[in-house]
Image (tube, helix red, strand yellow):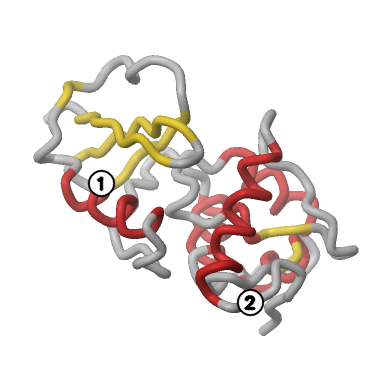
């Protein structure tokens, strides 16, 4: 089966979602529909439902399966660990490396976050620098700030709170 795609309009723009039989493969923002995939809202229904609930403040943890077949073992471990950062909280790149089993890989964790194709289902926006500053989030850091503020407004948490294990 070819990958399927659908879209959802959100407060951070239109999200294009790509799924395979193994799970969620990619989410991109804006632009045009992804190439190499067929439009199929039914195939994307569970991801669309969870994203819609998230953007309405009614979902704090995504449960959809991820298709990580193209990810390195390191990236997959970091992305799985990132999913454990609680809603409305943050962790530093170094803390996330420790959570993923790579205690000295803070810089490499930043690279894994930059490569993550399924944000916000993998909540890369919750990963910040050790000094509390936001760090990167692609070419539009306002999206990271918006997501952190949105979660803080729905959780009672402060955006500067950090999570450690």
Of the image marks 1 and 2, the number of the one nearer the N terminus: 1
Helix, strand or loop at label 1? It is helix
- 63 shown above or below 3: below
- 45 shown above or below 99: above
Q: Position of residue 45 (x, y in %)?
A: 16, 46
Residue 53 placement: quadrant: bottom left
Q: Position of residue 35 (x, y in %)?
A: 32, 15
Horizontal side of 94 relative to 155 (left or right) equals: right
Return the residue found at the far right. Answer: 131
User: Is the C-beta separation of discs 1 and 2 under 8 Å?
Assistant: no
Residue to which mark 2 is pinned:
157
Residue 128 numbered tag: none
Quadrant location of the C terminus in the rendered image: bottom right
Horizontal side of 74 relative to 50 (left or right) equals: right
Return the residue found at the far bottom. Answer: 165
- 13 shown above or below 60: above
Horizontal side of 134 relative to 13 (left or right) equals: right
The residue under the point 37% across, 58% down is 56
Q: Position of residue 132 (x, y in %)?
A: 84, 63
The residue under the point 14% across, 35% down is 41
Q: Marks 1/2: CA distance? A: 26 Å
Residue 59 placement: quadrant: bottom left
Residue 150 placement: quadrant: bottom right
Q: Position of residue 23 (x, y in %)?
A: 26, 48
Nearest the viewer among 33 and 146 is 146
Report the mark closest to the observer, 1 or 2.
Answer: 2
Nearest the viewer among 52 and 22 is 52
The residue under the point 9% across, 40% down is 42
- 65 shown above or below 152: above
Residue to which mark 1 is pinned:
48
The residue under the point 54% across, 43% down is 116
């Amino acid at each position: 089966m070819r990958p399927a795609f659908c879209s959802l309009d959100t407060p951070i723009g239109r999200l294009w979602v790509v799924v395979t039989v193994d799970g969620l493969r990619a989410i991109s923002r804006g632009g045009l529909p992804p190439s190499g995939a067929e439009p199929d809202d039914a195939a994307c229904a569970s991801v669309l439902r969870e994203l819609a609930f998230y953007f309405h403040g009614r979902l704090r943890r995504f449960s959809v399966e991820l298709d990580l077949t193209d990810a390195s073992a390191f990236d997959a471990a970091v992305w799985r660990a990132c999913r454990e950062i609680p809603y409305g909280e943050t962790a530093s790149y170094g803390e996330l490396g420790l959570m993923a089993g790579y205690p000295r890989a803070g810089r490499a964790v930043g690279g894994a976050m930059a490569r993550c194709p399924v944000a916000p289902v993998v909540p890369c926006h919750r990963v910040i620098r050790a000094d509390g500053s936001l760090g990167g989030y692609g070419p539009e850091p306002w999206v990271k700030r918006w997501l952190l503020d949105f979660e803080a407004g729905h959780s009672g948490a402060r955006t500067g709170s950090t999570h450690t294990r």
